[in-house]
Amino acid sequence: MEKNHYKRTTITSALPYANGPIHIGHLAGVYVPADIYARYLRLKGEEVLFIGGSDEHGVPITIKARQEGVSPQDIVDKYHTIIKDSFEEFGISFDIYSRTSAPIHHETASAFFKKMYDKGDFIEKTSKQLYDEETGQFLADRYVTGTCPVCANEKAYGDQCEKCGSSLNATDLINPRSALSGNLPVLKETRHWYLPLDAYEAWLKSWILEGHKEDWKTNVYGQCKSWIDQGLQARAVTRDLDWGVKVPVEGADGKVLYVWFDAPIGYISATKDWAAQQAGRDWEKWWKDEDSKLIHFIGKTTSYFIVSFSRLCCMQKAVLSFPTMFRPMNSSTSKGTKFRHPATGPSGFMSIYRNFPGSRTCFVMYCAPMPLKPKTMTSPGKTFRPGTTMNCLPFMATL
């Protein structure tokens, strides 16, 4: 049974992907609600750590770098700065905004993998994967496109169909093509390490489907239930790629940790980054102490992230022995009694207008004075140019 009171709360928000700027939808879906909750707890005098950071590995970044004729590091440096500046200008009150290309993250993610590897938590398998003979490299999932075997979408990726949401392997695609050369790839043997999610199936089923059913959006719950009911399968946590966290075992040259494995660890490495910036800070109490509560704001991220979120639970169960339940925060649209509580911040304030009896949801108006700086944030097809007066946005927040 979950405790009723904790001494401190660790709040995380989804790590924005560093291959483009954030837009107003990102703010509305994740960062403003998380910021509101952090400010709310601080106002109550509670001990809070609000974590953020850029997700900087993965194939889309290498594709963008190739298109622009620069290095992946150039891409993430550019967009990390843009995103970080945007958050600061909007007044999002992160205690730390870190990044997954930082040395402290590589060290932390490597340590996770190595500890699980040494404990025998992975399955090592040699399999045939798609290989582009013209470019001379194995094709990571996002370097393969083809027809989805489930819904016949002709633009499905090698890891997921974004039309029907099906989780795929590149070899599942019909008529697969290399996104690098456009050629038909061939199958070639390669070795990778897999996380046996099936070994955690009973625990995940109990935690997601039975113990925390009310915490998930209906569609996410349904999709997770479908995957679990079908039986979870082992998923590869390494990739043949030259951009990312190197696999820290002998004989793994040319391989990196799969971005869905290393990115969630970014919350922990960001906490370590925060602790390293001032003497006396202890990152471990925010993740290991029984009196610490962890809350994730994951917004409208794809349902596939929930599987990776479950992987993080498995990894932390294996590595950190973290005792507190993981609670994702979702929004609600219930009606209730009027309530107002202003909160001041370094560059804005919030007003909680509705408190709903029997629920954790309120209606919040977040206001921030915005300096006139062009191209601070973008939305599809236009640039969001903040004015010099208060910009107020209404949100549903779960408290």
Image (tube, rainbow, N blue to C red):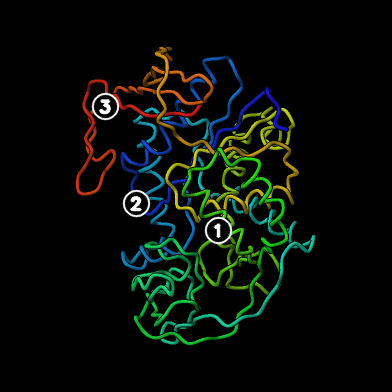
Q: Is residue 375 above or below residue 109?
A: above
Q: Secondary structure at mark 3?
A: loop
Q: CA distance from mark 1 to mark 2?
A: 32 Å
The residue to which callout 1 is attached is: 226
Q: Quadrant of residue 224?
A: bottom right
Residue 1: image location, x then y, percent: 73, 33
Do the CB atoms of the residues marked 2 and 3 lie less than 8 Å apart?
Answer: no
Q: The disc labelled 3 sits on which kind of residue? A: Pro
- The numbered disc on residue 20 is 2
**N-terminal of the two: label 2 or label 3?**
2
Q: Is residue 36 above or below residue 82?
A: above
Residue appearing at x 70%, y 31% in the figure: 2
How packed mark 1 is, by other alpha carbons closer than 10 Å (few <14, some 14-19, many 20 or more), is few
**N-terminal of the two: label 1 or label 2?**
2
Quick one: 355 or 385, which is closer to the camera?
Answer: 355
Q: Secondary structure at mark 1?
A: helix
Q: The disc labelled 1 sits on which kind of residue? A: Ser
Disc 2 versus disc 3: nearer the observer? 2
How packed mark 2 is, by other alpha carbons closer than 10 Å (few <14, some 14-19, many 20 or more), is some
Do the CB atoms of the residues marked 3 and 1 lie less than 8 Å apart?
Answer: no
How packed mark 3 is, by other alpha carbons closer than 10 Å (few <14, some 14-19, many 20 or more), is some
Residue appearing at x 74%, y 31% in the figure: 290
